[in-house]
Amino acid sequence: MEENFYHLPVMLNEIDQYLITKDTGYYVDCTFGGGGHSLYLLNKHKGIKIIAFDQDTDSLKRFKENPEVQKFKDRIIFCHDNFRNIEKKLKELNISKINGLLADLGVSSKQLDDKTRGFSFNSNDLLDMRMNKEQELTAYEVVNTFGKEKLQDIFFKYGEESLSKQIAQKIVEERIKGNIKTCNQLTDIVCKVKWARGKINPATKIFQALRIYVNDELGSLRDMLNSIANVLNTGARAAILTYHSLEDRIVKQNFKENINLKIINKKVITAGEEEIKINPRSRSAKLRIAEKTDE
Ligand SMILES: C[S@@+](CC[C@H](N)C(=O)[O-])C[C@H]1O[C@@H](n2cnc3c(N)ncnc32)[C@H](O)[C@@H]1O
């Protein structure tokens, strides 16, 4: 993989086709990451401008230092912030309405691969998992200081892990011997309770649960979804890419219940076979689109 590789954007054509209803005005990219989606859209639609959000300083660094991104510096504004603050941020920028909003949820390949971030179950990284490195709460703190019931609740709610109770119990027993520091240590503890079946690592759901909890991913998503109708122009669309069922359920439900939004794709859009071959991460992606209706 090339050294500069950040992240391969998912469903570029589908995002372009469904999101861009006007070739002018402001669009919001809630999850800039390496800028894959933003750059594609800026290149293709010369009249649009993008307000890009990302809470990760690595993404901000990418924005500032990557020459490909800097080519568009007059048409893109970067907000180093959580996308749950979108309404407040747009007000500060004096932008009342936008012509479209994209969110490509979760973590980037760069965050997963970075040995200092502690996201990946098969690494010797310190347990961390913060997307926003300025935040205090880390996965290390959760794993080493939270009580058994709280851990069980997190694993069940955010990982849908059927062995939540047994895994929480094992963690509490093991940490008496010494703090659980690395991702590998945690994976080994989970594997004492849960055995591997097929190719999926037994700790996958536990890592997902910790990441969602540490970053309050579902709370941020709900806040952002509740702002959508207030920031979109009539006829403008929101396109949300999710990667697991908890996120997808929230998006589906919110779009359905929001009286100011009309669902554009009744059937969820997924990546084609060709894309999945090139980018396996796209296999789990689900795209939902909604349009702002008249006030
Ligand atoms: C899947 S990646 C996006 C990749 C991007 N579309 C690209 O093509 O490079 C998700 C990014 O969103 C950021 N992110 C996730 N949740 C966020 C939130 N609540 N607020 C701001 N940024 C968030 C992560 O830090 C990560 O960089």
Image (cartoon, rainbow, N blue to C red):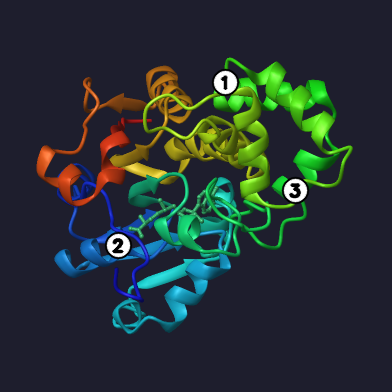
Camera-near label (1 vs 2) is 1
Work out which quarter of the rendered image holds the C terminus and state it.
Answer: top left
The mark that comes first in sequence, 3 or 1, is: 3
Q: Farthest residue in the right direction?
A: 176
Task: For the residues labelled 1 and 2, say whether their Cβ atoms are less than 8 Å apart.
Answer: no
Res 53 visible: no
Residue shown at the point (58%, 53%) measured from the top left = 82
Q: Which mark, by number, is residue 161?
A: 1
Ligand 1 lies under 8 Å from the Cβ of mark 1: no
Neighbor class of circle 2 (other Cα within 10 Å; few <14, some 14-19, many 20+) is: some
Res 100 visible: yes
Q: How many marks?
A: 3
The mark that comes first in sequence, 1 or 2, is: 2
Q: Which mark, by number, is residue 36?
A: 2
Q: Is residue 148 above or below residue 183?
A: above
Q: Secondary structure at mark 3?
A: helix
Ligand 1 lies under 8 Å from the Cβ of mark 2: yes
Residue 268 point in image, percent of width and height: 25, 26
Residue 215 point in image, percent of width and height: 63, 45
Neighbor class of circle 1 (other Cα within 10 Å; few <14, some 14-19, many 20+) is: many
Mark 3 belongs to which amino acid? Tyr
Residue that mark 3 sits on: 140
Residue shown at the point (86%, 46%) measured from the top left = 178
Tell me the distance, in whole angstroms, between the alpha carbons under discs 1 and 2.
33 Å
